[in-house]
Amino acid sequence: GAVVSQHPSWVICKSGTSVKIECRSLDFQATTMFWYRQFPKQSLMLMATSNEGSKATYEQGVEKDKFLINHASLTLSTLTVTSAHPEDSSFYICSAPLSTDTQYFGPGTRLTVL
Amino acid sequence: DAKTTQPPSMDCAEGRAANLPCNHSTISGNEYVYWYRQIHSQGPQYIIHGLKNNETNEMASLIITEDRKSSTLILPHATLRDTAVYYCIVRVAGGNQGGKLIFGQGTELSVKP
């Protein structure tokens, strides 16, 4: 079946550095992908919509200059957390719709900023 | 998209049916009910969705009331691997949002031996 992958699955970085997370749709194309963030014991929060060939659409309160999104191809979207700080430590999850009814999620990336 | 209300937690004995309720009293006529679940430290997994008719697949059944203001997800024979947070989401299928999902707090289901 359709699968969405993320890389890396976990990353630890120093405060002030930038971290790039990749999201790939493995056997289908996705003109749109979504990025979510999840803090411990909380629900998923939609951060932004990644659009192939155009700028990402960010949800209210999400800093677009801090969370850079690039939809490089029909199977790849990247999220770069710039100048990461400890408060950015979280579980980042991407998703891609296979159809108007079905959406597949990646396994998530655990980011820890020291 | 309409908001949903779910109990924060539920327990279920292994092998028994798990019935997870969801209230969506402000649902619009063109909004579907979707169910996803998230096993700890994994990405969410699609379970089932429906508009107004009851639906069944290999994972679960979805019962939607006639007025569509509430629904119930049924796992017919719960196993320990069904322990997860279950999310009920209502949204318009398709459209220019292309799949945008807004998650509520969900129900944490614990299946016990």
Image: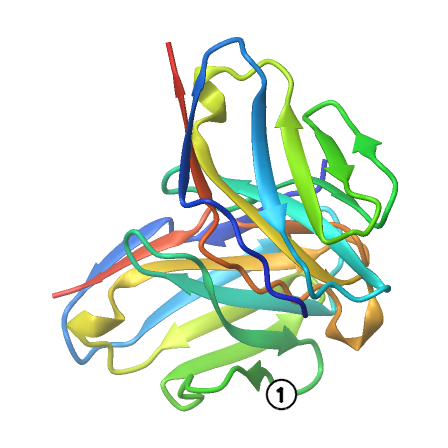
Query: What residue is disc 1 on?
Result: A55
| Residue A58 image position (x, y, % from top left) | 53, 84
Residue occupying the far bottom of the picture: A65
Residue drawn at (25%, 82%) of the image: A83
How would you rate the neighbour count of disc 1 (Cα within 10 Å): few for under 14, some for 14-19, many for 20 or more?
few
Q: Quadrant of residue A45?
A: bottom left
Q: Quadrant of the N terminus of chain A?
A: top right
Residue drawn at (40%, 88%) of the image: A63
Name the chain letter of the residue that bears numbered label 1. Answer: A
| Residue A102 image position (x, y, % from top left) | 75, 50
**What is the count of numbered marks?**
1
Nearest the eye: A42 or A65: A42
Q: Quadrant of residue A53?
A: bottom right
| Residue A49 image position (x, y, % from top left) | 60, 75
Residue B54 placement, left or right of B18:
right
Nearest the eye: B100 or A73: B100
Residue drawn at (68%, 70%) of the image: B1
Q: How is the image coloured?
A: rainbow
Q: Quadrant of the C terminus of chain A?
A: bottom left
| Residue A66 image position (x, y, % from top left) | 36, 85
Residue A86 placement, left or right of B46:
left
Q: Is residue A52 above or below residue B67?
A: below
Residue drawn at (75%, 35%) of the image: B63
Residue A112 placement, left or right of A90:
left
Secondary structure beneath dot 1 equals: loop
Name the amino acid type tagged 1.
Answer: Lys
Residue occupying the far front of the picture: B67
